[in-house]
Image: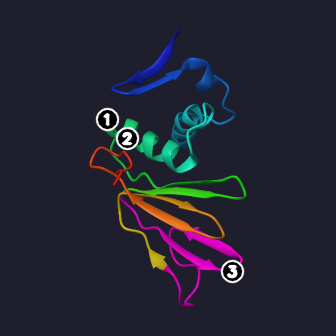
Amino acid sequence: MAGVGGAGVTLPATALLGLEARVDSALVWALALHRLRPGLAPAGALADTAEALHAAGVNGRFNFLLTDGHVIAATTAGDTLWHRRSAPAVVVASEPGDDEPGWTEVLDDSAVAATARCVRVTGLTSDGRIAIP
């Protein structure tokens, strides 16, 4: 099977060729999707993608965010990330969307899993993985 990869970043070439966009963020999305399809939780898939990029020597700001309409998953690595819960919703954004109280800054090198009921922030290890307490 031909693929693109190195040091923990392996992706079948067909995954890249099947993308509608041919930009660097599309490659990162393909890496995350490759982890989501077998059932990895969204925050874990994003954290694992950040780890794979880090292991391959890729430098950059890896703030990823995705949602399925029920769960918001995000990572912050090199840039800001904030969240605010206000019943019945939660907002996760790179910066506060207004001057209203309730915004909480997420520490750098973290993964976020948020629902309308709960926001869970977990630190990433130095190699990008989610730190398990």
| 3 is higher (above) or lower (below) than 62 | above
Crowdedness near tag 2: few (<14), some (14–19) or many (≥20) residues, C-alpha within 10 Å: many
The residue beneath circle 1 is 55
Q: Residue at x 58, y 85 (%)?
A: 98
Q: CA distance from mark 2 to mark 3?
A: 33 Å
Q: Residue at x 51, y 81 (%)?
A: 103
Residue bounds of the magenta highlight: 78-103
Secondary structure category for the residue under label 1: helix
In the rendered image, residue 41 lying in the magenta stretch gets the answer no
- Circle 2: residue type: Glu
Residue placed farthest to the top in the image? 1
| 97 is higher (above) or lower (below) than 110 | below
Q: CA distance from mark 1 to mark 2?
A: 6 Å
Give the dominant element type of the magenta stretch: helix, strand or loop: loop
Crowdedness near tag 1: few (<14), some (14–19) or many (≥20) residues, C-alpha within 10 Å: some
Q: Residue at x 51, y 68 (%)?
A: 94
- The x and y percentages for residue 88 are 71, 77
Residue placed farthest to the bottom in the image? 100
The residue beneath circle 3 is 87
- The x and y percentages for residue 12 are 55, 19
- The x and y percentages for residue 24 are 51, 39
Task: Please give left or right for residue 15 compared with residue 68 in the image.
Answer: left
Q: CA distance from mark 3 to mark 1?
A: 39 Å
- Circle 1: residue type: Ala
Disc nearest the viewer among 2 and 3: 3
Residue placed farthest to the left in the image? 126
- Circle 3: residue type: Ala
